[in-house]
């Protein structure tokens, strides 16, 4: 596995609580040549913190935004369009952007969220890594 994409929680946990990652997820991160995070994850974290939804992350926001261990995945028109057009009942806009990024870049997604497994195989979904 040369490149992987981290879901928002997997990114935060990889930096601040690696014990919360699944064993396969930890191994995938360690084995990857490149580890990416979507820019939408930065928005998700800062937005939730601003709205009071993730208070424990507030002291770490500056560190997360400037952190350089992971690469920033591109955000482009193809990803934006795919996020809107995905044939997937899941309506969370952050997850839709993250799924679209994984599909467009063909990077497996490290995520605890089994909702991603409901993506149809015809979408080009590269799969989810966790356990």
Image (spheres, rainbow, N blue to C red):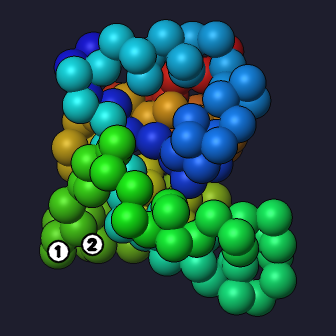
Tell me, yes or no, if residue 96 can be seen here: no
Name the side, left or right, on which 6 lies relative to 56. Answer: left
Name the side, left or right, on which 95 lies relative to 51. Answer: left
Given residues 65 and 38, the one toward you in this image is: 65
Tell me, yes or no, if residue 110 can be seen here: yes
Given residues 100 and 14, the one toward you in this image is: 14
Query: Pointer 2: residues within 10 angstroms few (<14), some, or many (20+)?
Result: few
Task: Tell me, for residue 77, which label it has, or none.
Answer: 1
Look at the picture and state if 113 lies above or below 65: above
Q: Which residue is drawn at 17% across and 70% down?
A: 76
Question: Dot 2 lies on which element?
Answer: helix
Q: Residue at x 49, y 11 (%)?
A: 27
Residue 14 coordinates in the image, percent (x, y): 56, 36
Q: Residue furthest bottom?
A: 51
Image quadrant containing the N terminus:
top left
Residue 13 coordinates in the image, percent (x, y): 64, 40
Name the side, left or right, on which 37 lies relative to 74. Answer: right
Question: Dot 1 lies on which element?
Answer: helix
Count of labels shown?
2
Look at the picture and state if 12 lies above or below 31: below
Query: Is label 1 in contact with label 2 (beta carbons under 8 Å)?
Result: yes
Task: Tell me, for residue 25, which label it has, or none.
Answer: none
Residue 36 coordinates in the image, percent (x, y): 32, 44
Look at the picture and state if 123 lies above or below 51: above
- Which residue is tagged 2? 81
Number of the front mark, 1 or 2:
1
Query: Pointer 1: residues within 10 angstroms few (<14), some, or many (20+)?
Result: few
Q: Distance between the residues labelled 1 and 2?
A: 6 Å
Image quadrant containing the C terminus:
top right
Q: Which residue is drawn at 81% across and 64% down?
A: 56
């Amino acid at each position: 596995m040369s490149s992987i994409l981290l879901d928002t929680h997997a990114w935060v946990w990889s930096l601040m609580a690696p014990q919360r990652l699944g064993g396969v997820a930890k191994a995938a991160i360690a084995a990857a040549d490149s580890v990416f995070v979507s820019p939408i994850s930065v928005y998700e974290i800062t937005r939730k913190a601003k709205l009071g939804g993730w208070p424990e992350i507030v002291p770490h926001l500056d560190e997360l935004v400037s952190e350089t261990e992971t690469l920033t995945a591109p955000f482009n028109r193809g990803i934006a369009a795919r996020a809107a057009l995905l044939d997937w009942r899941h309506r969370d806009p952050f997850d839709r952007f993250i799924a679209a990024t994984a599909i467009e870049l063909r990077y497996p997604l490290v995520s605890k969220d089994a909702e991603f497994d409901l993506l149809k195989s015809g979408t080009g979904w590269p799969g989810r890594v966790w356990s």
